[in-house]
Amino acid sequence: MLKKLSLAALVAMGSMSVASASTDLSDAIKGVTIGGFLRYRGTEKNIKPDGSDDHTNTTKNEYKAVLNMNIKASDAMTVHGRLVYVDGYYTNKSAADAGKNTNNKSTFNVREAYLNYKANGVNVKAGQQALATPLTDHDDDYANGVLASYTMSGITGVAAYYNHLSNAGATTTLTNNIGVLAVVADIKPVKVQAWYYNVSDSGDDNKDGYDAYFIEAGANVGPAAVRAQYISKKQDDKDRQKFWAVAATGKVDVASVTAAYLDFGKDGSDVTVGTTNADKQIAAGDILTDGIQQDNIDLRDGWGGALVASAKYGAIKAGVQYVHATSDYHDAVKGDTKYNEYDLDLAYAYTKKLNFSGYYAVLKSDFDGTAKDLTQNEFRFEAKYKF
């Protein structure tokens, strides 16, 4: 999974003069747009073995600031830059970890610096850029390379090649390169997309090269929508990992209900990313999704089902989730596993730019092996200001 490649690749963004010294300031800033966001996120997590007084409590505070800048060089050409500051620390974990950084990654870096040509259906990006594809994390995965696409009559063809893949400025460096081919057809009410990824081995002993496929078909008809996804990944001489899912959504006035079925083939969770993507993969459960992303929860040879309901009243959106997942992969300690998660989600748009959100979730983990069953409670609060 591309998200799991911890690689470092920072590129110094070349300076660009947009005006001479004699140019008025008002003229100098014409054609320049600036935006971004500031975000605080606090997470409280408590894990307790069933029937035991012992528990692990963790409090995590995270801060993120993003500044996007676009300089219009011509009607078709722009220069894009993205600066990211990330920081965070534990205030309650253990005596050894209290106060430590939460992610061990670069605090400040140049995340994007690329030229963008866009005209007559052609879109070309060259330079360091985020990997905004279905199998990559749009926030953390970025690389140096070229992406080219052409759109005609609702059909888009995509070809891209990147080197020096990175994950939020992590300190570990590998030399993987990636090639991407895709076709996306968005002809209302149907959207179909197919992606192929080829990631080269870095040349070390980790055997981290692989190829992967992502296929999705969906349709929206009035208040109803349906989506189906298939993902597979083969790493060197290992068995091909497979995952597929289907979800149906119905909307009535301000209310929405979604039912989903997920099938985790062999090592299926290893190819899922969750809901951080713009092209969201079918997934549910605040704790389960985060656990799969962080490698804390492994779902293999199993299945999952989810029921999600939400309603929006003015600036307030509230929702509930129930998720059941099983893994038939037998572990000597945990054995076969079953998960049941119950979530309450709440969001409030204070203004168009300032939003507050959070959730309270309970995950019950049942193990057939010798390990004790666990109950995990998690609370998250987030404040985000966009400018």
Image: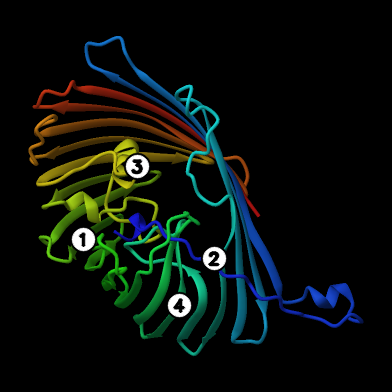
Mark 4 residue crowding within 10 angstroms, few (<14) / some (14–19) / many (20+):
many
Q: Nearer the viewer, mark 1 or mark 2?
A: 2
Q: Nearer the viewer, residue 331 or 367?
A: 331
The quadrant of the picture occupied by the C terminus is: bottom right
Q: Gap between marks 3 and 4, in whole Å?
A: 29 Å
The colour scheme used here is rainbow
Q: Please give the residue where the numbered disc 4 appears in the rendered image.
A: 145
Tell which residue pokes out farthest to the bottom in this image: 120
Q: Nearer the viewer, residue 361 or 235?
A: 235
Q: Nearer the viewer, mark 1 or mark 4?
A: 4
Amino acid type shown at disc 1: Gln
Asked whether the viewer can see residue 352, the reply is no
Q: Which mark is residue 290?
A: 3
The residue depicted at 50 percent of the width and 70 percent of the height is 129
State if disc 4 and disc 1 touch (CB < 8 Å): no
Q: Please give the residue where the numbered disc 1 appears in the rendered image.
A: 229
Q: Is residue 239 above or below residue 23?
A: above
Q: Nearer the viewer, mark 4 or mark 2?
A: 2
